[in-house]
Image: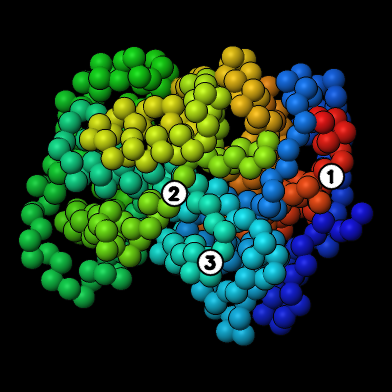
Amino acid sequence: MQSPIPTVTDRPHHADIIARLPSEWTAWPRDDGSVNSHVLEPNKTPSLFKKNKLRWPKRSVVFISDPHADAHAFEASLIAAGVAERKKKAGLGQLTLTKKGKQSEIIVGGDCLDKGPSNLELLRSVKQLYKLKARVTLLAGNHDLRLLMGLLALARKKDVGNQHFFVRMGKKVVPLFREVFDEYLADTHWDKKIPDEDTCRELLFPGDEWFKEFPFHAAGFLTAEGIDREVRKMESKNHSFEKHCLAAGLSLRKVYATSLKCQALFLHKKGEFNWFFRKMELVAKRGSFLFLHAGLDDSMGQMLLKSGTKYANKAFHRNLKRRDLFSFYYSSIANTFRTKYRDADLPLTKRGVEAIHKAGIHVVVQGHINRQQGQRITIKKGLVHVEADITLDAHSRKAEGLSGFGIGATLIGKDAGIVGLSCDYPTAKVITAQDLQGIYG
C-alpha cells in the first residue's frame, strides 16, 4: 500500500511543520487497553452497519476541527494535510492550493472562535480558502453560535428566553472583544453615544428575576438536569463575566460599544465577517459519513431519515432568523453542535440510531471533544464516531501541558481509508478502506 501520509512540499518555510509530523503510519490502535479495540471487531459492530455497504465520499475529505482562534495551527494543518502550501512569503494569509487541495473538500468542523491567540486572524485564514476557490464546508460549532446568540440577543427585544445569552458567552469571548476594540474602536470616539456603566450593565446582564423565571420557561424544552445545569452555569457567569472583562481592560461601556461593532462586523450585510455565519452549515453528508461538530439525538435522526441533510441545513438557517432564540438554542438542531451525550443533553437512543443507519449514515465525524494524543474512533450509543478535535490552539495546549500550536487533520477517502494525522501521536493512524469494507460492506 502506498503511504497514506500526505506529502508536504519540501520548502524551507515548511521545515517547522515537517519536523513535527509523524513520518510513518501504523494501523489504528487495537490493543486490549485501547478505546478503539472494539471498532474493527465484527461481533461488536452494530448490525445495521453490517447490512449496508459503506459508501465513501466521492471526493477526498480533509477534516479540521476546533481551530479556536489559532490561525498558525489552522494553516499549518492545511499544509500538513497536503492541500495547501505557503508562498515564498512565509507569514499568515500566504497560502496557495496544491493539486490535492484543488481536488479535495476541506471541511472545517466548527469552533473557529474563542480561546486564542487571535480570532480575527483565524477568520481571515478561513476566508482565504474561499478566495482561493477551495471547496470548503464550514460547520457550526457551539463556540461560534454562542457569539451569534449573544449578538442577536442584544439586537432583539429582551425576554426571559434570551436575556442571558450575552453573558452566557462567558470569559472565552473576552479575547475576541479585546481584539475588536483594539482594531476597530480604540482610536475613535467610540464612547460618544454609549450610555453609562450602570445602564450598560442592565443592557448586557440578565435581571434578578431571570433566575426565578427561567426554570418555568424552560420546562418542557430542557431535561431537569439541563435546566439545573443552565441555571448553575449562569449563576457563575453572572458573577464572573464583568471581572474577566475588567481584567482584560474592558469596562462595560467598552464591552457594549464592542458588541455593537461586532453586530456590524458579523450581522450586517456589508460587515467584514458577514460571510461567517451565512456560509455555515449544520451537517454535511458525504457517502456514508456524516460530518458535524458534536453529535446527534433521536429527533435529528428522524429528520435526517425523513428529510435529509439539505433540509436540516435549511432548518438551521431559518431558525436563526426567528425571533425566538430560546426555542432554537435548546432545540434538537442546536443539540447537534452542543451535545456530549450527557444526561443534560437531548437523548440519542436505539430508535434514533436505527433511523440514522436507515438514512445511510454509518460513521459520524465530529469535533467538540478534544483529544491530546490524536484522533480517536469509538462507538457511542451504538454509532461509530471519529473524534477529530486534536487540541490545535496554543491556548488550550498550554493549559494541558502541550507545547506550541497543534498540527493535524483527519483524512477520509476510498484510497487511504481514515487517516488520523497529529503532531501529538508518533505515527499516522490508519484504518484502510479494505479493513472497513471487509467488515461493514
Q: Amino acid at mark 1?
A: Thr
Asked whether, in this view, residue 87 is left or right of residue 334, the answer is: right
Residue occupying the point 25% across, 31% down: 324
**Which picture quadrant has residue 375?**
top right
Q: Which mark is residue 432?
A: 1
The residue nearer to you, when weighing 48 against 429, is 48
Residue indicated by mark 3: 133
Mark closer to the chain start, 2 or 1: 2
Q: Amino acid at mark 3?
A: Lys
For the C terminus, the quadrant is: top right
Are there few (<14), some (14-19), or many (20+) residues within 10 Å of tag 3? few
Mark closer to the chain start, 3 or 2: 3
Residue indicated by mark 2: 280
Residue occupying the point 56% across, 25% down: 305
**Which picture quadrant has residue 369?**
top right
Q: Secondary structure at mark 1?
A: loop
Indicate the position of residue 386 as horizontal and vertical percent values.
68, 39
Q: Secondary structure at mark 2?
A: loop
For the N terminus, the quadrant is: bottom right
Asked if marks 3 and 1 touch (Cβ < 8 Å), the reply is no
C-alpha separation, residue under disc 3 versus residue under disc 1: 30 Å
Q: Amino acid at mark 2?
A: Met
Examine the rendering and report whether any part of residue 347 can be seen: yes
Identify whether 287 is placed above or below 107. above
Q: Nearer the viewer, mark 3 or mark 2?
A: 3
Identify whether 2 is placed above or below 162. below
* Labels in figure, total: 3
C-alpha separation, residue under disc 3 versus residue under disc 2: 16 Å
Asked if marks 3 and 2 touch (Cβ < 8 Å), the reply is no
